[in-house]
Image (cartoon, coloured by chain):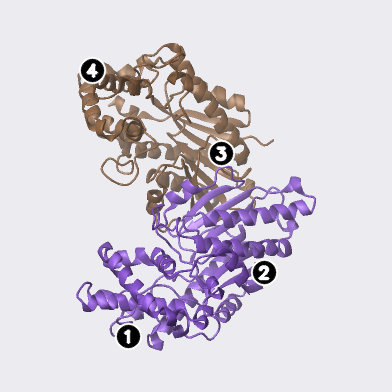
Chain colours: A brown, B purple
Amino acid sequence: MEDERNIVQFLSMNGGDGPLSYANNSCYQKAAVDCTKAMVNEAIINEFDIKQLPSATPYRIADLGCSVGPNTFIAVQNIIEAVERKYQSNGLDSSIPEFLVFFNDRVSNDFNTLFSFLPSGRRYFGVGVPGSFHARLFPKASLHFVYSSYALHWLSKLPKEILDKNSPAWNKGRIHYVGAPNNVFEAYSTQFRKDMQSFLDARAEEVAPDGLMALLFAVVPNGTLPSESFIYLLYELLGFALMDMANMGLVSEDKVHSFNLPIYFASPQELEDLVEINGCFTIKSMIPIMTNQMKNNITILDYNLCILHIRVGVEHLIVEHFGSEIIDELFNRFSEKVAAESQFVFKQDYLDNFVEQFVLLRRKVT
Amino acid sequence: MEDERNIVQFLSMNGGDGPLSYANNSCYQKAAVDCTKAMVNEAIINEFDIKQLPSATPYRIADLGCSVGPNTFIAVQNIIEAVERKYQSNGLDSSIPEFLVFFNDRVSNDFNTLFSFLPSGRRYFGVGVPGSFHARLFPKASLHFVYSSYALHWLSKLPKEILDKNSPAWNKGRIHYVGAPNNVFEAYSTQFRKDMQSFLDARAEEVAPDGLMALLFAVVPNGTLPSESFIYLLYELLGFALMDMANMGLVSEDKVHSFNLPIYFASPQELEDLVEINGCFTIKSMIPIMTNQMKNNITILDYNLCILHIRVGVEHLIVEHFGSEIIDELFNRFSEKVAAESQFVFKQDYLDNFVEQFVLLRRKVT
């Protein structure tokens, strides 16, 4: 059951609460949230100093890329309980602060659904923050704990070279950088670096001195080639299914050329380098999420579930580009390809080459 | 054209941006917002002391009952510009704070639409706050300016006596307290007092010392009877139209008995009394909005527009209770009744008995 931990955590998300909604298909994300609970708790035990929070100041938490719930509520609850325990263990029960929680996602996120899911009886004030976390979202030095789970591998936009027929990085007939010339990979990688730099620059302004950032990333181990990770191979098969449909005249070939997934999986080394370049944060920990923990939380792995998770994550992008008519056929064809290639795609080595990484940063005091 | 100022400012609102949406039918609300601009500016000139805002603290503004825009954005912009001018006129341009704006409305408000309307290039951080303003929504002493426009006459719930067949306040065959026994009026009035007390208690906790609240109320002059104000008479005609449909078997009579508008128009005296009972705020001004200003902003008054505004405000309540099938017929019948009774309903005295009141409160320093 070693492979269970590697399931993709997919993101930006179908709204509402129908059968294909994120809200009803985020059990893997939930498993990951549960696994990070202990790490968040430890972060607050080790790194949060009660004296840093001026009295009568609310403890302000932001979840960046929160989607529509319910996982964000679990994550936030974990953080709050850890802070409360810290006060209690110091005999300061009566000094526990109020909590203000900022739920952030893009403007296109379904905030109405998010708000309708807000737990009743919550011990915090909850607000929604629409906008890209690649730019400023909050006042200066106002946040004490920033959390972001499986959101940062979404690029803010596609690198324009990959859409340019005259560029060596034109990504003809593919939907991602797997199987593509190195120029394509470089274009993605450059965009990711720009995005992470914008992200870290904005947060450096917003996180209070000694404030914490707990970031959960989907990563590939240092030195992994796209052809060596199951997640990339799945994207490649999805691209093949689209090209098959183009060859049969079911979708326009040009449309396939201009469709690309705005997703980049960094390596731990790249993340470390980017934090270093920014210079405002100290890396307090950088640990892969434990296999055993994931095993306890994920009891069923089958390809259909895996495909469903990919679908929930990327369907809205496909629909926007191609229209909704092709979706069912595309995913049927994709499913057939996955079944046919499963021995290859789901090899242990390839499964190991896609992991979850918990990164804890602390804002330096300048 | 003296009557133009009296047009109802209706509230909680159809979402989206279709022809019957609030977003496209809030010109009267906009006129009122424009009219209050000078009052808000004066409030900040006279009552905001720059020294009260600790350096590096963002100036925090909340619009309570903001609906989906665009009026809330205009109101917020007015407040921000007034604060900026205050700094500039004191030669403190470089000390102008950051602004954090909380847009609040009920959970059922269409926040997705609100967020999609957020002005690009805005000079503030904007967040959405779902929840009833009759309870706590924000951390203690965290707000510097609270604004609320035409929201506070919505009751948090219907008083239960008016739905109770065994109560002397049972409101049989009517949809409001106009034309009803005094018990019905008393039940509404008691509920309004409870709601305003909850509102003021919550805000007393949340508004920083010396912080301001600018509240725009739809009111009836002290001593006005329901039968003497055009707005009440319109509600009565809407109720008659519903009862006609019940008598013809088009809607269930029981359903009409159990339908009531959760709206109460207080008098200025009632508002003063409630602020006094709360005890935490000083009334800095309490002025009716100027007729001339409204005249400049509202150039067309006809009954159809008036009916449309009522419809935009209460349609969702009617649909929820009766279903959407009856709406067009109901408003056609209502429209006929208004046309037939217009000489009576829109008499000058009755028009004068429904006004907009600007109330400026300042949080006492305890």
Amino acid marked by disc 1: Ser
Amino acid marked by disc 4: Gln
Residue B96 visible somewhere in the drawing: yes
Quadrant in which residue A275 is drawn: top right
Q: Nearer the viewer, mark 3 or mark 1?
A: 1
Question: Mark 4 sits on what residue?
Answer: A343
Instruction: Estimate the x, y position of residue B99 in percent, counting from the top left.
Output: 63, 50
Q: Residue at x 46, y 55 (%)?
A: B68
Taking depth in this image into account, of A92 and A162 the one nearest to the observer is: A162
- Measure the C-alpha gap from mark 3 to mark 4: 42 Å
Label 1 sits on a secondary structure element that is: loop
- Measure the C-alpha gap from mark 3 to mark 1: 58 Å
- Measure the C-alpha gap from mark 4 to mark 2: 72 Å
Q: Residue at x 22, y 79 (%)?
A: B247
Q: Nearer the viewer, mark 3 or mark 4?
A: 4
Question: Mark 1 sits on what residue?
Answer: B167
Could you tell me if the residues under marks 3 and 4 are in contact, i.e. CB atoms within 8 Å? no
